[in-house]
Amino acid sequence: MSHRVVIVGGGFGGLYAAKGLRRAPVELTLVDRRNYHLFQPLLYQVATGALSPGEIASPLRHVLSGNPNTSVWLAEVTDIDVDGRKLVLREHKLPYDTLVLAAGAGNHYFGHDQWQPDAPGLKSIEDATEIRSRILRAFEAAEMETDPDARRACLTFVLIGGGPTGVELAGALGEIANDTLRHDFRHINPAEAHILLLEGGDRILSAFPPQLSEAAERSLIRLGVRTRTKALVTGIDADGVTILCDGATQRIPARTVLWAAGVAPSPLGAILCRRIGAQPDRAGRVIVEPDLSVPGHPEIFVIGDMASVTHQDGKPLPGVAPVAMQQGRYVARLIGKRLRHEPVEPFHYWNKGNLATIGRRSAVADFGFIRFSGPLAWLAWLFVHLMYLVGFENRVLVLIKWTYNYITRNRGARLITRR
Amino acid sequence: MSHRVVIVGGGFGGLYAAKGLRRAPVELTLVDRRNYHLFQPLLYQVATGALSPGEIASPLRHVLSGNPNTSVWLAEVTDIDVDGRKLVLREHKLPYDTLVLAAGAGNHYFGHDQWQPDAPGLKSIEDATEIRSRILRAFEAAEMETDPDARRACLTFVLIGGGPTGVELAGALGEIANDTLRHDFRHINPAEAHILLLEGGDRILSAFPPQLSEAAERSLIRLGVRTRTKALVTGIDADGVTILCDGATQRIPARTVLWAAGVAPSPLGAILCRRIGAQPDRAGRVIVEPDLSVPGHPEIFVIGDMASVTHQDGKPLPGVAPVAMQQGRYVARLIGKRLRHEPVEPFHYWNKGNLATIGRRSAVADFGFIRFSGPLAWLAWLFVHLMYLVGFENRVLVLIKWTYNYITRNRGARLITRR
């Protein structure tokens, strides 16, 4: 009987692990709650009507139809039977010889889960279409509102968190207000929208060098986005946000508040830690060995946003797509080598660089040896995202949409759909 | 003060009326619950994963941004104050001099509304993504099911109603089972799916001549679809359908049942009839005068699926897109003529023909003087639908997707999303 590998999660980590095991002499099962791989880096473009969900998602079965050794199971994992080597699903138990956990991360509200309904985060397609509806409904409500204060609240958008997601959402909102909707309304001027990006630290895009943070802020200002650093959110409700800034409490009336401040690893990490008697790191991620297996269980691997790995430079690896991809490929290679009884090197992350975009023709790029911003960084961003997008068809469609959106300043997927 | 025209509904009727009034000296308001125009004839392609919702929907504000005299209101109509000439919305009242009702139709379960949860119909984007999820989940459940009877029920799809929507859905389902999913599963063969099209009358596509109904049935058989005519549905629940066929009651166990059997006009028609003291026709539509206005109220027009109009040949006009488009254009012209005190001709429907498609390279076409089926009819279908699709960008995207789907036999938008 062949070696049974079970992978949980069809994100970047799980998908690259599965693809890497395509020719390995294993019987592979990939388990996911969703039937598609989602290209999360472009999710903000769905939330702002530039792309459709189908263009950044690919059916897992289709992506893996070239894997003759792979079954895909649409199921939810409820527990792990570590001693019996079985993955516990809602209605089945799935035996494994090697288990790879790559279930990613969700939104994290730092102990304030009650904020979630009033400040949705952006992790799933449903999140993206919900945020898209909220943004568009806010302009619609403003068009019919006659009270100036209420209208101002309708046209105020608060984004919490100055990382890449917050910055990219803010840039896209700036474009929507200034360009996309310019001729669409008769009673309001969409360009009067107030877009506010709140960041708790002392600069946005803190993973980038300071000069790129400054460049990003200048680009945001050109799009009408105001940035507020060292702003601590102390309350969120249906009518707005309360912040603590420079020791003073301030209330910002706003109809639309979006959360891009923190992610928490899948609860599966905590379940695993309990079952193997390990402590997660402060962020709740599973601390793994240099080969990404968990202590005492060389047959269980944790990769991607769920794993806590220290980089060779001593810093923890960030929860980004390239880390998950490289870890997925590494684990696939490792499993193959083990089966052939070959020695295994520890995981080594190769940082190819960091990119974030801020609207039309503007982005920041940090490739370590070279750092730049502006149209060239924007082209680099476009190229990299198209290259890694899964599926040739999606690449063609996204390229056409981007070209069309760039020329016409339109965003065709501006649909308000119901939950 | 200029003449105030209010149009309810941004479907084919309302949109063509609004576009026709672009240069008229009127103050125009278009009211819709949705912020987009939906190209309903292609909705079944969203329900079967071939197209994304954004590709067959266009934001109404964008479509009408070239109408300087037009406001768009996202609102729900609750009543009509016929004497005060005001449209009653949930939170506002909207005064009019001329009112055009074009609110379309929803699903009709012939007094069995309890069937709705187990047999969804296909009228909205939410319907389409829900049906898409159900179809895909059925195959997923079959893949994990070990009991042969339960697996057979998972792979049984019952379509109720042999009109164009039912036939097109059945054809697309046949393609999904035979082509799209061919390499996707390891434990089931999707081609073993049972697709059953039930029709109450004695042939499918009864609006077409009998020889085209036969051609359509032959095409369906090639796709593995069985057609059952004179089948009366007497019960639908979560486990299947009960039918009365040739005097015998039969039970068909099926996980997925879809409704394409009947439409009912928007409840706004009944509200109007009450307010003007008129009787609707048997199907609940508003009976209108030869100029599409309602009896006694020349300032109120009803068009599209809500209106009951008798064709010059004595038959009632069908609830199809071309009728609504021509009525919208006619009412726009009529309003312009009235304002210029010019005489008005009664509405005359020009039947350009009837088309329905049944999967790859197969369709039926009835242009009156010529009737044919096969690849040529299919090309005519493609051409007509691309031509009438709203928005240049959508046309380009749909053309690319169709080309790609045709070559690869893939359907990229196969996403299971949550309600």
Image: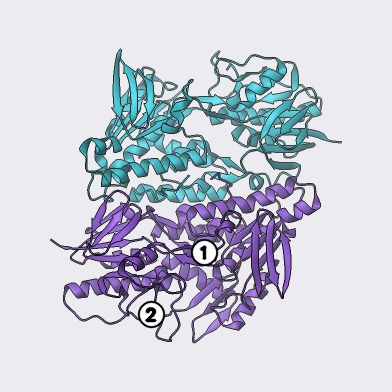
Chain colours: A cyan, B purple
- Residue found farthest to the right: A1
* In this rendering, position of residue B288 left or right of residue B53: left
In which quadrant will I find the N terminus of chain B?
A: bottom left
Q: Residue at x 45, y 52 (%)?
A: B54
Give the residue type at disc 1: His
Name above or below for residue A39 compared with residue B241.
above
Between A365 and B397, the one lying in front of the other is B397
Q: Secondary structure at mark 1?
A: loop
Check disc 1 and report the residue beneath it.
B108
Q: Residue B340's x, y, as percent?
A: 16, 74
Name above or below for residue B161 compared with residue B29.
below
Give the residue type at disc 2: Tyr
**How many discs mark residues in the rendered view?**
2
Q: Which label's residue is closer to the chain start, 1 or 2?
A: 1
Between B388 and A320, the one lying in front of the other is B388
Chain bearing tag 1 is B
Chain bearing tag 2 is B
Name above or below for residue B364 compared with residue B39.
below
Disc assigned to residue B349: 2
